[in-house]
Image (spheres, rainbow, N blue to C red):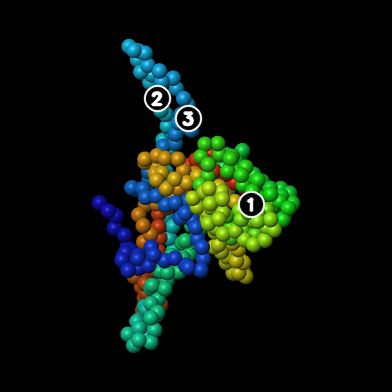
């Protein structure tokens, strides 16, 4: 029996919660760690040893001999999603006043829809920060696959550095699964795309002037996706002056992502985000809001970010100063 919840799901508000995308901010979390649906809040997934898929057994069979037999192993892991949500209380007097303005054709403002929109945006910003932290965490890669650029002269904002050589080495680091996705911040991309050495190589020029396009980078390095994170977050604590910073830092991540990989069916992918159900939105009546009561708009989702194959990725740290 489904539990009784004091929460009314509103299909109109849920539609806003699912569809909302801020066109001015490039949030890339759902591409960097793709969502995959799971059947419950708790689920299981299996981790398979890499060597079993690449060990060549003796497959010869004698005329009356037994066919060689192999056995596959796997470690069953427990997983569970986490619940994320935000809410905003709106007095009934505000809701009624806004409705009166709409009825007169004086305004299109709906405080419930407005709250849903911005709560959805804040949820996405929070997920973006979680995914960025996971993607740029060196602990989520094999130590041998992490390159830390220590010298300023080797960083990509130095015109005499060699970003192509560093990128080529990072692509070669995962021995089995060559990365098909490159992820970086807009700050790193704005430096990398103008690097004279890379411009010469990609465009075949001798001057190194100009910029390379995203499509040119994808074609030249033979990848499927180039993800540029341009989102911002306020890093200041409550009550402090606003401190806007880019969510994605100075690192470059190279990962092998398989969109078909699932916890239950297998497949190799650097990481994914199991989610249970879609993002929801709705209202709760709250008599304690103002003199005439009000409604609480709540938006939430159940999801968690997982890195499941450290060997399928590489990380370049401090690509720019």
Disc 2 from disc 1: Cα separation: 48 Å
Residue 22, image x, y percentages? 47, 67
Residue lying at 58% horizontally and 40% vertically, measured from the top left:
172
Residue lying at 44% horizontally and 51% vertically, measured from the top left:
34
Disc 3 from disc 2: Cα separation: 14 Å
Q: Earlier in the sequence, mark 3 or mark 1?
A: 3
Q: Nearer the viewer, residue 250 or 42?
A: 250
Residue lying at 55% horizontally and 55% vertically, measured from the top left:
216
Residue 46, image x, y percentages? 41, 37
Q: Quadrant of residue 169?
A: top right
Q: Would you place residue 74 above or below residue 89 in this image?
A: above
> Judging from the image, what secondary structure is the residue with disc 2 in?
loop
Which quadrant, please, contains the C terminus? bottom right
For label 1, the residue is 201
> Judging from the image, what secondary structure is the residue with disc 3 in?
loop
For label 2, the residue is 71
Q: Are marks 3 and 1 in contact (CB under 8 Å)?
A: no
Q: Nearer the viewer, mark 3 or mark 1?
A: 1
Residue 196 visible? The answer is no
Q: Would you place residue 106 above or below residue 44 in this image?
A: below
Q: Assess disc 2: are there few (<14), some (14-19) or many (≥20) residues with their C-alpha within 10 Å of its C-alpha.
A: few
- Is 213 situated left or right of 63 in this image? right
Q: Earlier in the sequence, mark 3 or mark 2?
A: 3
Residue lying at 35% horizontally and 15% vertically, measured from the top left:
66
Disc 3 from disc 1: Cα separation: 35 Å
For label 3, the residue is 54
- Is 295 situated left or right of 226 in this image? left
Residue 174 visible? The answer is yes
Q: Nearer the viewer, mark 2 or mark 1?
A: 1
């Amino acid at each position: 029996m489904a539990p009784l919840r004091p929460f009314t799901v509103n299909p109109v508000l849920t539609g806003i919660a699912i569809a909302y995308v801020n066109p001015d901010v490039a949030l890339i979390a759902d591409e960097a760690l793709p969502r995959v649906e799971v059947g419950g809040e708790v689920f299981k997934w299996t981790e398979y040893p890499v060597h079993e898929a690449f060990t060549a057994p003796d497959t010869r069979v004698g005329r009356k001999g037994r066919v060689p037999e192999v056995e596959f192993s796997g470690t069953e892991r427990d997983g569970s999603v986490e619940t994320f949500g935000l809410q905003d209380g709106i007095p009934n007097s505000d809701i009624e006043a806004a409705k009166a303005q709409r009825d007169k054709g004086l305004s299109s403002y709906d405080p419930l829809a407005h709250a849903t929109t911005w709560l959805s945006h804040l949820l996405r910003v929070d997920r973006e920060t979680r995914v960025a932290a996971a993607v740029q965490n060196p602990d989520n890669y094999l130590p041998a696959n992490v390159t830390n650029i220590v010298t300023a002269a080797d960083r990509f904002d130095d015109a005499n550095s060699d970003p192509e050589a560093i990128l080529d080495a990072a692509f070669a680091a995962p021995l089995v699964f060559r990365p098909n996705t490159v992820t970086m911040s807009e700050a790193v991309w704005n430096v990398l795309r103008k690097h004279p050495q890379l411009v010469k190589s990609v465009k075949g020029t001798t001057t190194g002037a100009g910029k390379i396009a995203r499509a040119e980078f994808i074609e030249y390095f033979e990848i499927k996706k180039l993800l540029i994170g341009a989102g911002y977050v306020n890093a200041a604590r409550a009550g402090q002056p606003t401190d806007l910073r880019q969510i994605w830092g100075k690192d470059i991540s190279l990962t092998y992502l398989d969109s078909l990989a699932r916890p239950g069916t297998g497949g190799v992918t650097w990481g994914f985000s199991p989610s249970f159900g879609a993002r929801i939105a709705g209202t709760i009546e709250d008599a304690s809001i103002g003199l005439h009561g009000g409604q609480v708009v709540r938006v939430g989702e159940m999801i968690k970010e997982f890195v499941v194959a450290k060997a399928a990725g590489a990380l370049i740290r401090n690509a720019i100063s």
